[in-house]
Amino acid sequence: MLIHWEVSDVYNDVLKDFLKKAFEKGLIEAVIAPAATDNSYTYALVTKKEDVDKLTPIAPVMQWNGADMIRRITRLKPAKRKTLAILRPCETRTYKELIKFNQINPENFYLLTYDCPGTIHARNYAYEQTPVDDLIKSMKEGKISEKVRESCRVCEYPTPIKGVGDIGFGIIGVDEPVFFSLSERGKDFLAKMEIQEGERDDSSWVEMHRKNREKWLEEKRITGGRKGIEKFLAQCMNCHNCKDMCPICFCKECFFEDHSVFDYESEKFYNWADDKNGIRLPTDKTLFHIGRLIHMGTSCIGCGLCQQACPVDIPLYRLFGIVGNDLQKVFDYKPGVNDDLPPVMEFREEEFEEFVGLKGGEE
Amino acid sequence: MSEKEFEPVIVGFFCNWCTSAAADLAGTSRLHYPANIRPIRVMCSSTVDPVYLIRALQEGADATILGGCHPGDCHYISGNYKARRRVVIVKTVLKSLGFDEDRVLLEWISGSEGPKFARVMNEYTEYIKKKGPSDFKYVDSLGGE
Ligand code: SF4
Ligand code: SF4
Ligand code: FES
C-alpha cells in the first residue's frame, strides 16, 4: 500500500524517529514536548529514548506556553543535560523573549519548531477531539482550520524564522517534511544527524495570516475609553487566570497580587462612593488589565493563552494583541523575533521628546 | 448665578532633586501656582510605577504630572530616561483604548527653574480646566455619563 504523508500522525512519527536517532547519537539527553492526557495535551520532559513514544510533538492543543515550562526548569540553575525542546513558533519567540529578560537560561537547550497549523482552544478540544492531522491537512490545502483559536488565525509569524530557535521542520508545500537550520548550532546538529537540509515555501501561509491580522487589528480594536473597556470586561471576575497563563507576566511578586497596594482605610471606599455616585467592587478590576498592558504589553508575543485561560470567554487577545501592537509600533519592536532588547529594558538618551511637555517637547 | 467654576485636581509626582526643589523655589520667590496641584515628593521620576499615574486618575485626579530632572541631570544617572519610556507606554495605552492621554504629563523642571515650574502648573491647570473633568475616575463606578 502506498503511504501518503496525509496518513495519520506521520509528521509526529518523523519527529519521534528524529528524537530517537538524536538520543542514539548522544546529541541529546532529554526532550521537552507535548504528551497526550485524557482529552488534552500537557508538556512532558523525558530523559530516555524509550519514553519518546509517549510524546506527541505536534499537538492540536497548547495548554501552556512551553517556554514558560523551560523557564520553570532553568530559573534556579541551567540545565545540565542536553535537551531538545519542540515548541510552536509563538513559544519559540517567547523563549527568545524570556532569555532577554533573564528568565530562561538557554545553556544546553536546542529548540525545534515547525510550520504551525494552529491550535484548538483547550476547552473546545475537551468536548470535541479533533486530531492534529485534520489541522495539518487543512494547512496543506492552504486553509486555516475554522477550529483553531483566534490568536492562531491572526498569528504574525506562524512558521519558523531564522535566528529564532535552532531547527526548523517544514511541512507546507512539500510531500515529505524537511528539516532546516535556524542557527549555527542547528546546522551543526543536523549535520551530526546526517540530515540533508531541505527547503519549502511558507510564504502563502504567512501571507494568509498577516491578511487576517491586518483586518483583525482594524476591526477588533477596543475603543471608546471608559465605556469601551468596561463593556469589554463586563464579565471579568478578576480571577487573574489571564495573568497566570501569560508567559511574559513572570514577576514573582505582582503589583496586582500584593493586596497591600490596594489596602485603604474603610472611609476611603465610602468617600469614593460619595464622589463617584457608587463604586463597583472590587475597585481594581479594570485597572488590573490596564496595568498589565502597561507592564508587559510591549512584549506580548501573541500566544493568546490569556484568552484561552479566561473562564468567562472574554476575547482578551483583542485587548493585549491590539494595544500590544500599538505599543510595539511606537518602540519599533517585535518581541522574540530578533536580538533587540525589550523596550522596558533599555532607553536612549535622545528619544521620545515629543512625549515630554504639553506641546511635545517644545518650550 | 453661574455654576461654580470647575476646579480640577492635578496630582504631581515630583522628583526630590529637581521639580520638588523648583516648587519650593517658586514658593519662596512668591511665584503663584494654583492650589489645584497636589504635589507628592518622590526620590526620582523613575520610582513612580506607571500604574500609579492611572491609578491617581481612577481615584479622582483629573490629571497627573510626572516631574523629573532634565536629560543628563538625573541624580541616579538614568532614572528620567526610564521614566520617559514609561510615560510613552502609559500615554500609548490610554490613547489606544480611547482615553485622553493628555491627562498624563511629563515635564523636565530643574531645581533652579522656579519660574518654569509656576508657568507649567498654571498652563496645565488652565488646559485641564478647559478640557473639563476627567472621565477616568468613573472607571469601575456607577457614576459618570
Ligand atoms: S498577553 Fe496574552 S497573548 Fe500576550 S503574551 Fe500574555 S498570554 Fe500571550
Ligand atoms: S481570566 Fe478572564 S475573568 Fe479572569 S481576570 Fe482575566 S479577563 Fe478577568
Ligand atoms: S533624580 Fe530627578 S529624575 Fe531621577
Image (spheres, rainbow, N blue to C red):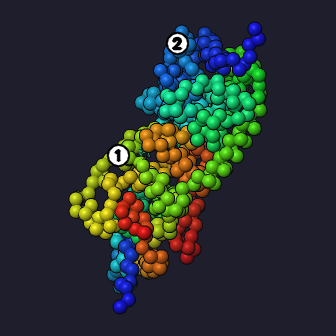
Image point 49% across, 62% down: which residue? A225
Measuring from the top left, give residue A70's x and y in whole percent.
49, 29
Of mark 2 and mark 1, the one earlier in the sequence is 2
Reading the image, the residue beneath label 2 is: A51
Q: Residue B66's quadrant in the figure?
A: bottom left
Where is the C terminus of chain A found, in terms of image quarters? bottom right
Measuring from the top left, give residue A359's x and y in whole percent.
56, 73
- Element marked by disc 2: helix
- Residue B124 can be seen, yes or no: no
Residue A222 sits above or below residue A362 on the image: above
Residue B101 sits above or below residue A159 on the image: below
Image point 66% across, 50% down: which residue? A215
Please tell me in which quarter of the rendered image ligand 2 is found.
top left
Image point 46% across, 56% down: which residue? A231
Using a 10 Å C-alpha cutoff, classify the residue at mark 1 as few (fewer than 14 neighbours), some (14 to 19) or many (20 or more): few
Instruction: Please state which of residues A191 and A230 is positioned toward the viewer in this rendering.
Output: A230
Instruction: Please state which of residues B130 and B32 is positioned toward the viewer in this rendering.
Output: B130
- The residue type indicated by label 2 comes to Asp
The answer to the question of whether label 2 and label 1 lie on touching residues, with beta carbons closer than 8 A, is: no
Measured Cα–Cα span from mark 2 to mark 1: 39 Å
Q: Are marks 2 and 1 on the same chain?
A: yes
- The residue type indicated by label 1 comes to Glu
Image point 40% across, 43% down: which residue? A240
Which chain's residue wears label 1? A
Measuring from the top left, give residue A190's x and y in whole percent.
69, 20
Measuring from the top left, give residue A343's x and y in whole percent.
55, 50
Label drawn at residue A257? 1
Using a 10 Å C-alpha cutoff, classify the residue at mark 2 as few (fewer than 14 neighbours), some (14 to 19) or many (20 or more): few
- Residue A56 can be seen, yes or no: yes
Q: Is residue A255 left or right of residue B107?
A: left
Which chain's residue wears label 2? A
